[in-house]
Image (cartoon, rainbow, N blue to C red):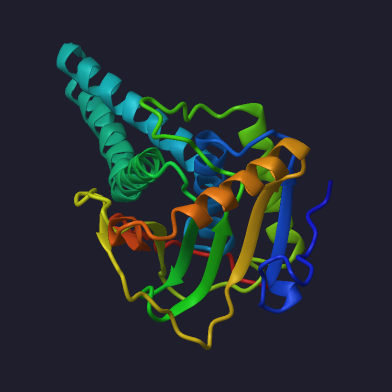
Amino acid sequence: MKPKAMEEGQGCSEPETNCMEIETNADSIDCSMIFHAINDVSGFLLYMHQQIPSVLQDITLEFEKWCKEYSKLETDLAQIQGTAAFRRKHASEMREIKYGIKRFDKLMHTISDFQTALKLMISEVPNFQVAILVLGATPLRPRDVYEFSFPNHHSASVVTSPDFAKTRAAEVLAKKVIRGLISKGVGSASYPGISKLFLLVKAPSSLNLPLHFVPKRDFRYSKKVVPFIVRCKCRTQACKQMDANHLELHTESSTESTANELIWFQCRHVIKGLAFNKPTEE
């Protein structure tokens, strides 16, 4: 089913063109679906806004290939018995591969840390529901803001070892979100120079992941920027009942301590775009 713009009364007060609702056939939205939706869209936004030279999956495969090749060349160099000219050629190949590794090394490590932080956040927050991706120099003065909500993710308790493997349901949801963003023209405007991608998540104020997230209780971005809102939900009757039960539980527990107050947390791992030669238009 194609993504549809949110109708009035569905929790979206922004202009219709900046709101989108994505439905999934799954009975609930699990940890894997949330992780891969946010992670895949992050790579999509970096590529569409010309912050990386190719899609993230291709860069990852290329980087892994370079690392394996360099390791093999290092081993071979120690065993080479050929002429000096042959050894120089071998060393030249190593330098070329090392340059490619160095160019993408910081990006790949930051993305790995970003993914680890996101998984930990989803694991620590049973009712993880809202995340924001910000493109720009700082979160306070962004170029673009993408807000994602998952109202059908209601876990009774923290899962000991959540499974983040990319299931069929997770893959389908991520693709639907990306197709929906493309249909709305996301990425049609490129940015001059290097930009940054920030992740912010709403979580209980008692959350303690200091190596990955810092609290931003009073976070507000410029009112001049209209956020693009994506709401991922289930279309099944079971999910509708789950929503009703969750709302009732939330109403009954409205007098809980401020330790469960939801505030913004900013991920420490900020993905910075790469400088590369963009093709010029003829």
For the point 40% across and 79% down, the residue is 220
Looking at the picture, tell me which residue is in the foreground, 94 or 135.
Answer: 135
- Residue 27 against residue 10 in the figure, above or below: above
Q: Is residue 32 left or right of residue 85?
A: right
| Residue sitting farthest toward the bottom | 224
x and y percent of residue 3 in the render? 78, 54
Q: Is residue 62 visible?
A: yes
Q: Foreground: 72 or 131?
A: 131
The answer to which image quadrant residue 187 occupies is: bottom right
- Residue drawn at (70%, 34%) of the image: 26
The C terminus: image quadrant:
bottom right
Q: Please give the count of numbered marks on the rendered protein.
A: 0
Q: Between residue 257 and residue 129, name the one nearer to us.
A: 257
**Residue 54 seen in render:** no
Image position, residue 213 (x, y; %): 27, 55
80, above or below 200, in the image = above
Name the residue at 62% across, 66% down: 229
Q: Residue at x 38, y 73 (%)?
A: 139
Q: Nearer the viewer, residue 42 or 24?
A: 24
Side of 41 relative to 138 (left or right): right
Q: Position of residue 32 (x, y in %)?
A: 52, 34
Tell me: 49 left or right of 17: left
Q: Position of residue 73 (x, y in %)?
A: 27, 22
